Amino acid sequence: MINTPASTSRITDEAARRRTFAIISHPDAGKTTMTEKMLLFGNALVEAGAVESKRGRGTASDWMDMEKRRGISVSSTVLRFEHEDKVINLLDTPGHSDFSEDTLRVMSAVDGAVILIDAAKGIESQTLRLFEVARSRGIPLITFINKCDRPGIDPLELLDHIESTLDLMPTAMSWPVGDPGDLLGVVDRRSGSFHRFNRNPGGRSSRGGVIATLDDSFDPEVPAWVRAREELALLDDAGHEFDFDMVESGLSTPVFFGSALTNFGVELLLNAVIELSPPPSARVDLEGVERALDSDFSGLVFKVQANMDPRHRDRNAFIRICSGRFERGMKVTNARTEKPIALNYSSEAFGRQRETLDEGFPGDIVGIVGATDLQVGDTVFQGEPLLYPPLPTLAPEHFIQIRNADARRHKQFSRALSQLAEEGVIHVLTQDGGRDPMPILGAVGQLQFEVAIERMSTEFGVEVLSDQTRWKLARRTDEESAEVITRGGLADVRTRTDGMVFALFANQFQVERLERDKPELRLDRLVG
């Protein structure tokens, strides 16, 4: 398909309407609640908490049985909706640190991120780790201080905490009035309006606040208002003014205060995402060359998910459109295999639900059902060949050895491991990268094993037995280094199903000694 001047103009215009972002946070900071409330204010949900979408009943972001049962997100979710003439692609990331690899992949598909911070806890370890990922990828951040209706840290202390911990200039776009735990409302610093806080139990349908003017709201007899005026004056004197260029360059973050559970402050945040989060821009390929938005189609596969519809045992590959116009049924080339592939069964995603997508533009996420030739990290393109940089992943730090409890189901056992490995749920390690009746499973966290074993049982009908191993951590290596390591008995070497080689160690001391004695060997923690 050759782009004409009219079609290239439409591509850039449509790309400018897109906002593709992730919500990242420490577990229990309220990330999934915030996701649902942004959908509520974007009119993509009828009622939060139920959860009932416009397209039918069903959980919007947490759709796996384990997610519903435990109340945690273990898999990233794509949610697309339109709001104020903008197309919003919201990617809900796993909150648990055991699923950091999935979050890493999601961060490669977004243009911006909302970082959610608990007002009582500040920046926690997982939040800091995700922030470092966002910074390394140059992703602009918007900060939301959540749970401000509960006792927490003083707002000025929180700003100092953000600046000192993240080395990032926080710019308060809204400001809370009232003591922590006794919230009266927030001031929108740009408009000067005051949003009164109305506690809404359950936060199901209320807009979460009443807008009034500062003059009408200010009572000189109320200490909270006097203090808020003083704090706002301090912010003005300190030069805490919004600077879009600093936000875009990753030097500053706009900060909002509110309570997702009660819907309060969520609408201000959603409007900020539309206004402040960047639209898609030209992406750089592996050779450092930019692929213009209005050039031929290209996309990056950042996630593969099987059995989202267990009735059909489907397999869905999620592609971030990086350039050009996507058309359902178009033929593209897979850069990894150099083979053509037809993108016939395409859909837009809303959690587990999906609807046919006939066309898409840079920033959109398109799901391709049944694309068995697509793997995580693949580049697909039309026209001039290109290859986008590989997606980062982490070397495993936990290991178990598994075996099939029923030898009659060896085909299902192999198919389940192959599928989970392709999705990136776990690392499957064997002696030579081939089939192994007792493979080693590697993971960043123990909870990944629980997910893998439960999915093998529920989706593939395979029960497995597992044993602990003596290995505690791994480093990616290459064939030359692996030969030296094996010959000297310096560590155990295993091969992942995609051919990547790992050296397995019993403790950190072994790694440090090998790095000291043989610095020429390749031993990488970050894989990709």
Image: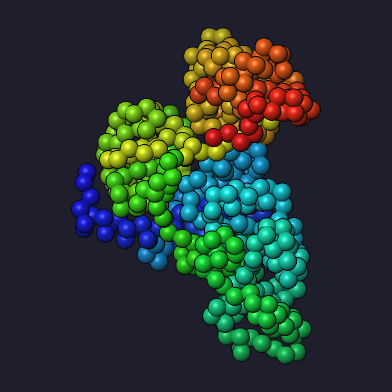
In the picture, residue 97 is in which quadrant? top right
Q: How is the image coloured?
A: rainbow
What x and y, as percent, mark residue 299? 38, 42
**Of residues 416 and 261, the one drawn nearer to the viewer in this rendering:** 416
Q: Can you see residue 63?
A: no
- Quadrant housing residue 516: top right
With 406 as the anchor, is 83 left or right in this view?
A: left
Image-based side of 363 in relation to 167, left or right: left
Q: In this view, does 390 lie above or below 406?
A: below
Q: Which residue is drawn at 36% across and 48% down?
A: 291
Residue at x-position 30% and y-position 55%: 11
Q: In the depicted view, which residue is nearer to us: 243 or 233?
A: 243
Residue 485 in the image: above or below residue 365? above
Quadrant showing the C terminus: top right
Is residue 76 depicted above or below 144 in this figure? above
The x, y position of residue 415, in whole percent, is 49, 20
Could you tell me residue 154's position as x and y percent?
Answer: 76, 69
Q: Quadrant of the N terminus?
A: top left
Q: Which residue lies furthest to the top in this view?
A: 408
Q: Which residue is drawn at 56% across and 14% down?
A: 432
Query: Quick one: 162 or 120, which is closer to the camera?
Result: 162
Measured as percent of width and height from the top left, residue 455 is found at: 56, 28
Label count reads 0
Is residue 265 visible from the viewing direction of this image?
yes
Instruction: Please name the residue shown 46% across and 64% down the image.
Output: 274
Residue 115 picture quarter = bottom right
- Residue projecting furthest to the right: 509
In the displayed structure image, the side of residue 413 where residue 343 appears, left or right: left
